[in-house]
Amino acid sequence: MVAQMATQPTNDAQFIRDLDDPRLIAALEENTALAYADCAREWPGEVDATPARVRYNCGAPFPLFNGVACARFTPETVDEQIEEAIQPFRQHGLPMMWWVGPLSRPAHLGERLLAHGLQEDGHTPGMALDLSALATADDTPPAGLTIAPATTRETLEDWATISTRVFGAPDALRGALLEMGARQSMRPDPQWVYYLGRLDGRPVASSALFFGAGVAGVYNVATLPFARRLGVGAEMTRAALRLAQERGYYVSILQSSGMGYRIYEALGYRTILNFSVYVLPGAAD
């Protein structure tokens, strides 16, 4: 059983309308950058967005919350631009992630990041789903599973606890995630919607939806180990996607982990691009 929220659609002209829309790759990259930047603003942290790149810095000792995306550098000045972008993280000894996508420039950006001390940390599929083709054949939720938006401090605390445990974030960050989620949820028309899943009344799973760049981005789909392989993750994703449909969106995007890839494929997601991820270790690392 899923409890939904009343919503209003945004300007239809801004939506990516299908997977053949030529704006989709840029929208997937931009939704990722906007989502993490919005978290940094509410952490509170720092966001510095220029035409050449987006930098977000939560000040947290965990690379996922600090990073650079949408880099559009010139070959002649790429080294200077890289150093300028990572300087705040070096200064404070913070780990960070650099997202390199197909629109990142110059073409040899990854090589230059390695030369500046970043380490390649693998590849992450960027996937997209035409919401009109959402697979519903197996959408019967597991027995005892209930899903509802996390909007109270109690439910947001459960959401933050699950997210930190599953994604390996330091437990000390749980309080910051709680406060961030509380501020985002209090907005009149929130871009972020958090979902908490309970199995027989026990909090077991989380998911989140971020609206930006004309697409609905699914984030933080996480299930505690004892509740996996029951269909919980798929239903947590569907809960977010139903809201995206209600708001009038046509396309959803996400970045998939290896564990979740087959689940998203079964829901109808297709790989649109691959991010190369580079990490700058922090002082503690």
Image: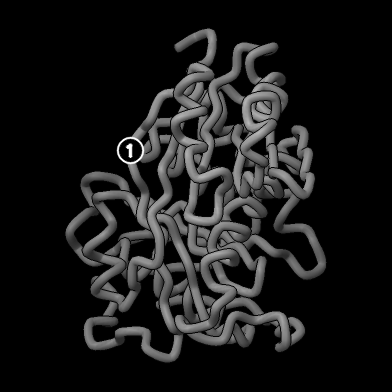
265 lies above or below 48: below
Secondary structure beneath label 1: strand
Q: Where is residue 57, by image quadrant?
A: top right
Q: Is residue 214 left or right of residue 22?
A: right
12 lies above or below 84: below
Q: Is residue 196 left or right of residue 139?
A: right
Q: Position of residue 240 (x, y in %)?
A: 49, 71
Q: Which residue occupies 40% across, 61% down?
A: 273
156 lies above or below 191: above
178 or 114: which is nearer to us?
A: 114
221 or 90: which is nearer to us?
A: 90
117 or 93: which is nearer to us?
A: 117
Q: Position of residue 102 (x, y in %)?
A: 48, 55
Q: Is residue 259 left or right of residue 23?
A: left
Q: Position of residue 109 (x, y in %)?
A: 51, 37
Q: Which residue occupies 45% across, 61% down?
A: 254
